[in-house]
Image (spheres, rainbow, N blue to C red):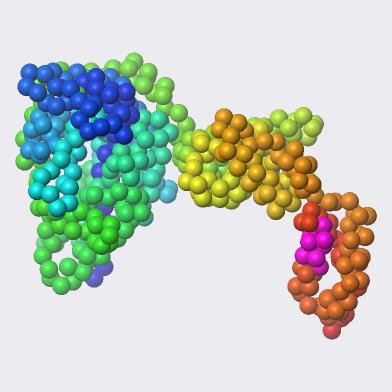
Amino acid sequence: MDYDVIIGLEIHAELKTKSKMFCRCDNDSLDKKPNTTVCPICLGHPGTLPIPNRQAIEWAILAGLALNCKIRELSKFDRKNYFYPDLPKGYQISQYDLPFCSDGHLEVNGRDIKITRLHLEEDTGKSTHPTGKNYTLLDFNRAGTPLIEMVTEPVIKDASEAKKFCQIFQQILRYLDISNADMEKGEMRCEANVSVQEKGKWKYEGNCEIKPIGRYKLNPKVELKNINSFRAIAKAIDYEIKRQIRALGTQEKLGQETRGWDENKGQTIRQRIKETSSDYRYFPEPDIPPIKIDGQWIEKIKAGLIELPLEKKKRFKTEYNFDGATAEILASDKNLASYTEKVISELRAWIEATGDNWERQKNKLAKITGNWLISELFKHLNKDGKSIAEVKITPENFAELVTLVYQDKINSSAGQKILEIMYKKACAEPGRSGGDPTDIMASLGLEQMDNKAELEKVIKAIIEKNPKQVGQYRQGKANVLQFFVGQVMSATKGKANPKIVIEILKKLLPPKVDK
Ligand SMILES: [Zn+2]
């Protein structure tokens, strides 16, 4: 049997406002002692009044604008009623039928994914169950943290598309600087609704509602929770698709339920049978009047809408001729993108100072910059788990390294040596740059040898010492040339310009014998 996979995502992200959603408590509770950033409002004491955080509302709307959503003129908060120990009020202030943002879309790998809504709510406290103990510990520091919830239509087609959506969503939140969105820290939490349906037996109706065709009975959807990394999103969804298809093949009954991802077992595990939304008995929050959002306010919020990762990626491709993969990596992080552009702007100033034409040299210099950032600098960053923002190699110095490579003053292995020294210096001396690459090159004598007369002398000596290899070369043995290049490089301590070496070798070696 052939199946279609249907996935919808629900992503929660904590906003990094200074204070909490409805009180003045410190919103930054990482590394703080449990239950120290709390007050009667976020603890839900009777008689207290919530006051909405304006910054949180503006950031929720900003996130909605970034996802091409419509912004509602009149919005309100609602109470979502349920009992859980980490929810002292017995209800969560959320938004039900009038969310701030709705009807958006986000481009993922060239496909527009429809977004149903984005609303604002408060986070709950945290409960921990110490192993082997018969009690639960409660920490209310997180209670009342502003939380946005974004919901897509069930239009995602496979695990990798779902994973990519979550990654792009995280990039956007970080670009807008409204959430750290770290999944490992629980600042961003992704849930996926997954179902499989027989091909040709169902269709979308209205706003992406899934309807059966004829007498077909739709298979239930399963909600996946407890996913703590992008890798886990893809693994959990893939596991779930296989499990559902297998169950259908054996006539096992599939139910609408919530399943958690168990990273150690690599399985999803049933948690509970899913409630429907009426179980929450939503009703309007009586303590907060409806919120009017006029055009003027939206315009003010729009001012914070900077160039987002996807637009940046597209511009990087057209403006600097980066290939798709390079542009995507460089645009994935706001700091990296801005670093790249600073380096390129330094290079432009340098080219123009030499009287050369920037447009003519731009693509080549951008390409070297991209390669040296991604292949070489990333090697060091990944090894130490650092981000570009933490490394103080100045764009000026990095650009200078690029010019040394560009002008053939150093070869690639010398460049790597210089970059390693720049990187170590920048890490060892906080607040200081990694040093000037030209100085490092000079002090280590790494400048490439491109004096032809000098190189000819060295090469002649090597040819004389290796008559056997010369003979092999004459017989047409292909890799002998590489042997000679290697000999020259070791004789010159890696400083010879390989292009010139090959040129001279071809001139000095006897011609190949015709066979
Ligand atoms: Zn509080």
Image location (x, y in percent) of residue 197: 21, 60
Is 261 in front, or is 303? 261
Q: Is residue 384 above or below residue 35?
A: below
Image location (x, y in percent) of residue 155: 28, 49
Specify whether residue 54 is in view: yes
Q: Is residue 251 above or below residue 78?
A: below
Specify whether residue 343 is in view: no
Image location (x, y in percent) of residue 337: 53, 37
Q: Is residue 412 above or below residue 12?
A: below
Say which quarter of the image contains residue 38: top left
Which residue is situated farthest in the top direction here?
296
Image location (x, y in percent) of residue 286: 9, 21
Name the residue at 11% across, 52% down: 272
Is 115 in front, or is 356? 356
Position of 493 with respect to 81 (left or right) is: right
Q: Which residues are magenta?
A: 484-492
Q: Which corner quadrant of the figure contains ligand 1?
A: top left
Name the residue at 22% across, 31% down: 141
Position of 313 with respect to 432 (left or right) is: left
Q: Quadrant of the C terminus?
A: bottom right
Name the residue at 78% across, 42% down: 442
Name the residue at 25% across, 65% down: 242
Q: Is residue 175 above or below residue 241?
A: above
Position of 146 with respect to 389 (left or right) is: left
Instruction: Please give the count of numbered marks on the rendered protein.
Output: 0
Q: Most prominent secondary structure in the magenta stretch?
A: helix
Say which quarter of the image contains residue 220: bottom left
Is 118 in front, or is 55? 55
Which residue is situated farthest in the bottom direction here?
515
**Residue 239 within the magenta-colored segment of the rendering:** no
